[in-house]
Image (cartoon, rainbow, N blue to C red):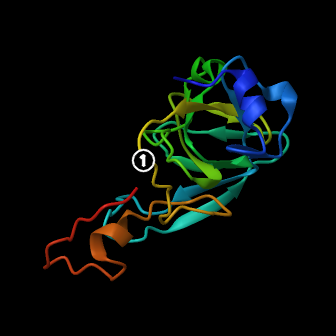
Amino acid sequence: MILSGQQILERLDGDIQIDPFDESRLNPNSYNLTLHDELLVYEELVLDMAKSNRVRRIRIPDEGLTLSPNQLYLGRTNERTTTHNLVPQIEGRSSIGRLGLFVHVTAGFGDVGFSGYWTLEMFAVQPIRIYPGVPICQIFYHEITGEITEYASKYQHNRDIQPSKLHEELCDGEAHDPQLPLKFGNGR
């Protein structure tokens, strides 16, 4: 089951924390999160899962920034969220999708206990101008049943945009030797 907007409001400052919170962005069954004024782009032409890939920071000016197709942009929400006893999930707003902007490539599903800013994996179908502070996506909450183990992994309590840390799982934090097989573990 998904929480209604009223239930989100009732559970605010308990199981749900959204900082800052603006009641005008509360929807019938979600809450609109806004875009921060910075993005990261990978500098490598070929991304390697087994290593930390270099990134470059881009500021989104007040007059906007045009995103190009065939480029992954990592952004983040202005809002920091914390969720207990519920499963948070983000999706792009329909008005944003109708402009051909994907707000997350695959990682819209959160974990019980996640606390931090949401990293957005943004991809444009065609050139599009974006602006800082625009309501970019919506968060909604699923009820969960059974015993709960809260999230406590590598993206927990982040303070900035988070590039992939998959290499930490594959190589146990060590530099990868291409002559050796990778070690696969658990984690997001």
Pick out the residue farthest to the front.
147
Circle 1 packing at 10 Å, graded few (<14), some (14-19), many (20+), is: few
Amino acid tagged 1: Glu
Q: Is residue 9 above or below residue 86?
A: above
Please state the horizontal and vertical placement of residue 100, each as a whole percent of the image.
Answer: 55, 24
| SS category of the residue bearing label 1 | loop
**Residue at image coords 59%, 32%:** 141
Closer to the camera, 28 or 163? 28
Please state the horizontal and vertical placement of residue 40, each as a whole percent of the image.
Answer: 60, 57
Residue 170 in sight in this render: yes
Q: Is residue 20 above or below residue 171?
A: above
Please state the horizontal and vertical placement of residue 36, each as a whole percent of the image.
Answer: 74, 48
Please state the horizontal and vertical placement of residue 7, each as a whole percent of the image.
Answer: 71, 26
Closer to the camera, 187 or 105? 187
User: Is 154 placed left or right of 128 in the picture?
Assistant: left
**Residue at image coords 22%, 81%:** 177
Where is the C terminus found, in terms of image quarters?
bottom left
Closer to the camera, 20 or 179? 20
User: Is 110 placed left or right of 169 in the picture?
Assistant: right
User: Is 110 placed left or right of 178 in the picture?
Assistant: right
Closer to the camera, 48 or 24? 24
Residue 135 in sight in this render: no
Quarter of the figure with residue 187: bottom left
Q: Is residue 125 above or below residue 48?
A: above
**Residue at image coords 73%, 36%:** 11
Residue position marked by numbered label 1 in the rendering:
147
